[in-house]
Structures are given as structure tokens and as C-alpha cells.
């Protein structure tokens, strides 16, 4: 029930809840993202059989108030959406590669998801062009992708990691992150590797006692 807005090079922009109301729009956006990744795996399996390189994608999802409608003039006319929430979605997509995950979602999208999704907090980040930090998450799949006990342990250990990281206990955060490399079916290995490297850098150059826990991105 999404609306494909436009194709921009290798990018697809889509939105939900316009021109018609869409119930559970966050769920449907995330379901679409997970379906894209599932079909991408099928495509890459076929490419591998032909000896070709795999294709990788990153997905950014955000929820917020935007302006939607017909815009332009007689020479150039388009039905699209504009607004800060749209720009943030684009910035979140750009962070999927440095954070080592396939999907990055904003907090409002995360909060709007019903139970049954494996959603994990990644960081507090101020995207390029913004001063204030936003809480970002990734969605790894549905609850059925792991045993409940193992899943609960992963969540608990991950919360301990974020707590140690934000308390500037770099060595503890590094140890916990190292133990989580194989968690979540290995889907967040690259994320933990990146955060371990960040902990090493912050240990050498501490952010100070007044640190607001926000990482400020220097790239889109």
C-alpha cells in the first residue's frame, strides 16, 4: 500500500499514507523493507551461480509530518512529498553503510511498530546538517528468526553495551561488543566492529564529562 514517488539513479523513494490513508503505515513500510531484502537474497543467490558480484542495498525509514501533493508548474509537474521528515529518511539511508546494517529507522517508526519485530537501538546521532541528536534503530526481522531465550539475552547484552558506551566505560563496551559479534545470527557483526573501533578512538580522545552521547555524522 505504498506510493512509489520517484527513481533517482539507483535510489527508490516511496511513502505511505498518501494519497489515501494507510493504517499501520510503519509496519507496512518495514514489511516492504524486509521483503526487499528477502528478494535481494534470492537475486544474489542467482548472481553467485553465474559468477557475478552481489548487489547490496541500504534502506532508511522515517515517520513524521510532511507536505504531500502536486507541485511544480506547466513545464515540470510532480506529485511528491517534502519536509524535514523526508530529509531525515534520506540521511538515515546514508548511515546504513557506516553502521553496517541493512535498515536504519527513526524513533517514530520504531515506536509505531507492533510487537513481533526484532528492533535494536543503534545510536544517538546528529545527521549531517543537524545539531540535535535522534535515536536510530535497525530492524533485523520478526521474532520468529531466533529462539525467544536467545533473543532476550541478545537484547539484554546489547543494552549493557550501550550503557557502558554512554558511560564512557570504553574497555567494558569493547568486551561486550566483541561478545555480540555472533549474536542476532551475525547480522550486526559489522555494526559491533564499527563501534569497537569508535570506542578505541574515543578512549584516545574522550568526549568530556558534558558529553550528550550524540555521535555527529560528517557524511550523508
Image: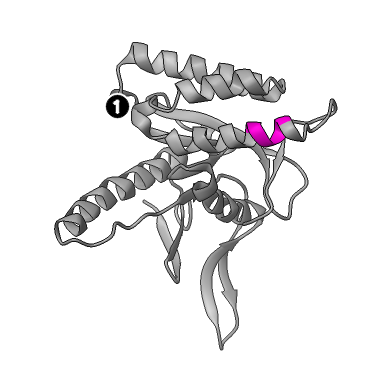
Image: 58 above or below 25: below
- Quarter of the image containing the C terminus? bottom right
Decide whether the magenta segment is chiefly helix, strand or loop.
Answer: helix
Q: How is the image coloured?
A: one colour
Residue at the front extreme, as displayed: 204
Residue that numbered label 1 is attached to: 145
- The residue located at (39%, 24%) in the rendering is 183
**Residue 149, quarter of picture:** top left
Q: Is residue 127 left or right of residue 179?
A: right
Task: Indicate left or right for 131 with 83 as reference.
Answer: right
- 202 falls in the magenta region: yes
Classify 8 as above or below 195: below
Q: Position of residue 62 (x, y in %)?
A: 55, 46
Instruction: Using a 10 Å C-alpha cutoff, classify the residue at mark 1 as few (fewer than 14 neighbours), some (14 to 19) or many (20 or more).
Output: few
* Along the line of sight, the residue nearer the viewer: 116 or 218: 218
Q: Is residue 163 visible?
A: no
Query: In the rendered structure, which segment of residues is drawn in magenta?
Result: 199-203
* Residue shown at 46% from the left, 40% from the top: 26
Residue 208 painted magenta? no
Q: Residue furthest left?
A: 49
- Residue 101: where, in percent of width, then height? 45, 42
Residue drawn at x 34%, y 14% is 148
Disc 1 is placed on an element classified as helix
Tell me where residue 109 appears, x and y as whole percent.
53, 38
Amino acid at each position: 500500500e505504498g506510493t512509489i514517488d520517484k527513481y533517482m539513479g539507483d535510489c527508490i523513494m516511496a511513502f505511505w499514507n498518501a494519497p489515501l490513508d494507510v493504517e499501520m503505515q510503519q509496519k507496512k513500510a518495514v514489511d516492504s523493507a524486509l521483503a526487499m531484502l528477502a528478494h535481494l537474497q534470492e537475486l544474489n543467490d542467482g548472481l553467485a551461480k553465474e559468477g557475478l558480484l552481489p548487489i547490496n542495498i541500504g534502506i532508511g525509514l522515517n515517520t513524521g509530518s510532511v507536505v504531500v501533493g502536486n507541485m511544480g508548474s506547466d513545464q515540470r509537474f510532480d506529485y511528491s512529498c517534502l519536509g524535514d521528515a523526508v530529509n531525515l529518511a534520506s540521511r538515515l539511508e546514508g548511515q546504513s553503510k557506516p553502521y553496517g546494517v541493512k535498515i536504519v529507522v527513526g524513533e517514530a517508526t520504531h515506536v509505531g511498530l507492533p510487537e513481533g519485530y526484532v528492533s535494536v537501538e543503534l545510536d544517538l546521532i546528529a545527521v549531517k546538517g543537524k545539531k540535535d541528536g535522534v535515536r536510530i534503530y535497525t530492524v533485523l526481522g520478526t521474532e520468529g528468526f531466533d529462539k525467544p531465550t536467545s533473543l532476550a539475552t541478545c537484547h539484554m547484552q546489547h543494552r549493557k553495551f550501550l550503557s557502558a558506551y554512554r558511560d564512557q566505560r570504553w574497555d567494558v563496551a569493547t568486551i561486550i561488543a566483541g561478545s555480540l559479534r555472533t549474536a542476532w545470527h551475525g547480522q550486526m557483526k559489522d555494526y559491533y566492529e564499527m563501534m569497537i573501533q569508535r570506542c578505541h578512538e574515543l578512549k584516545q580522545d574522550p568526549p568530556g564529562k558534558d558529553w550528550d552521547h550524540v555521535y555527529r555524522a560528517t557524511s550523508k
